[in-house]
Amino acid sequence: PAARQGGAIRLALACGLPPRQRQMILAVALTGEVSAARTVLGHVLAPGVPGEVLLLALHSPHRDVQALAAGRIVAGGADGHLTEHLLESLPRLGPAARAVLDPYLAAHSFEQYWRNYHRLDAPLRDQAGRALVKLDRRVVDLLAGRLASRDTVQQLQAVAMARQIGLAGRYEAALARLARGADRVVRSSAVAALGSCRTLEARTVLAGCLGDEDARVQANAVEALQAAGADCAAIMPLAQSPHNRTRANAIRWLLTDGRPEGPIALAAMLTDPRLAHRISALWAVRAADWRLAGPLLARLAASDPSTKVRARAATLLRDWQRGVAREVPA
């Protein structure tokens, strides 16, 4: 009878058994009749009970026992080992237990990903981030909270994560705010991410960033506007920018868009007396695959005063002959 079984269980647990024997009795009770499982709940849910005991309750076939164990785990917190077991157990749990554990696991998994983000290789960051979003859509709200942080380090990582996992469009308003913020590094990162937002609002913000006081923000705004599908008319003046990267990005866009101003601006940049501009012009040639620049490159490879320019021009010409496409750093 259930009453007699419950009494026997209570008596056994009151006898001060060694931990292993105690856990065996709890395991039998928790997986047995519902009355036996409920008899031992007080022992299972008591403060300081090991995680292994809570997992026994979570594996009980009784949904109410599962839910109570889930609540106790969440209230007490879980280490990485216990969390791993929770993730494995989730598909077998009832709706009540899942309702308790889902938000906790989403937040915990997000925190783990957040802490280890910069230690992961880029492909793994992308794969883990996308899997995390699929696990629980609440992760999207957690990332939104980091974008709203006042800490620039958190802002930068949140922007990078949003861009990495393909969710920049969801955070367009937050990115637009950061693109107008006080920190130039955050502005630069947010501007780059806004290129994924192919909306009029995003393009308007990016157009305003073309006049930013920081050269990197300007350069990223040119790239982002091109990615966002804007017309290149707004960036034509930047083909004469004093900032080499901004100028190279503008010229590359003009070349890829087939604008007649592009080749003229490129020739001027390839022969600019400033070394940084000639090097960035070579990047624009390769990025646009502008092979009509071949005669100018041959001249640079033969007679440019910089060994770096001569070497890069010669390498680009050889790569074209071999049919190789490689990126030249700006």
Image: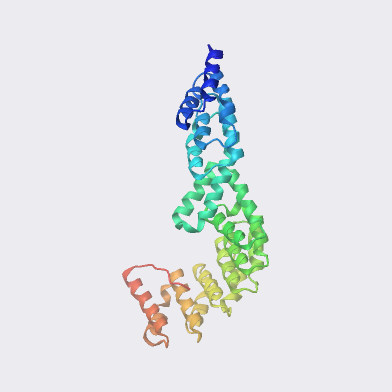
Pick out the residue farthest to the top.
1
Pick out the residue farthest to the left.
322
Give residue 208's position: percent from left, percent from top: 67, 67
The residue depicted at 37 percent of the width and 80 percent of the height is 311
Q: Is residue 208 above or below residue 76?
A: below
Horizontal side, residue 297 vs residue 267: left or right:
left
In the figure, residue 6 lies in which quadrant? top right
Give residue 233's position: percent from left, percent from top: 60, 69
Give residue 26's position: percent from left, percent from top: 50, 26
Horizontal side, residue 81 vs residue 200: left or right:
left
Horizontal side, residue 292 vs residue 99: left or right:
left
Coloring scheme used: rainbow
Q: Is residue 293 above or below residue 58?
A: below
Give residue 76's position: percent from left, percent from top: 59, 40
Q: Is residue 68 above or below residue 251?
A: above
Tell which of 28 and 187 is nearer to you. Answer: 28
Horizontal side, residue 141 vs residue 127: left or right:
right
Q: Is residue 262 above or below residue 197?
A: below
Q: Examine the rendering and report whether any part of residue 299 can be seen.
A: yes
The residue depicted at 49 percent of the width and 20 percent of the height is 32
Q: Examine the rendering and report whether any part of residue 195 can be seen.
A: no
The residue depicted at 51 percent of the width and 32 percent of the height is 53
In the figure, residue 223 lies in which quadrant? bottom right
Q: How many marks?
A: 0
In the figure, residue 294 lies in which quadrant? bottom left
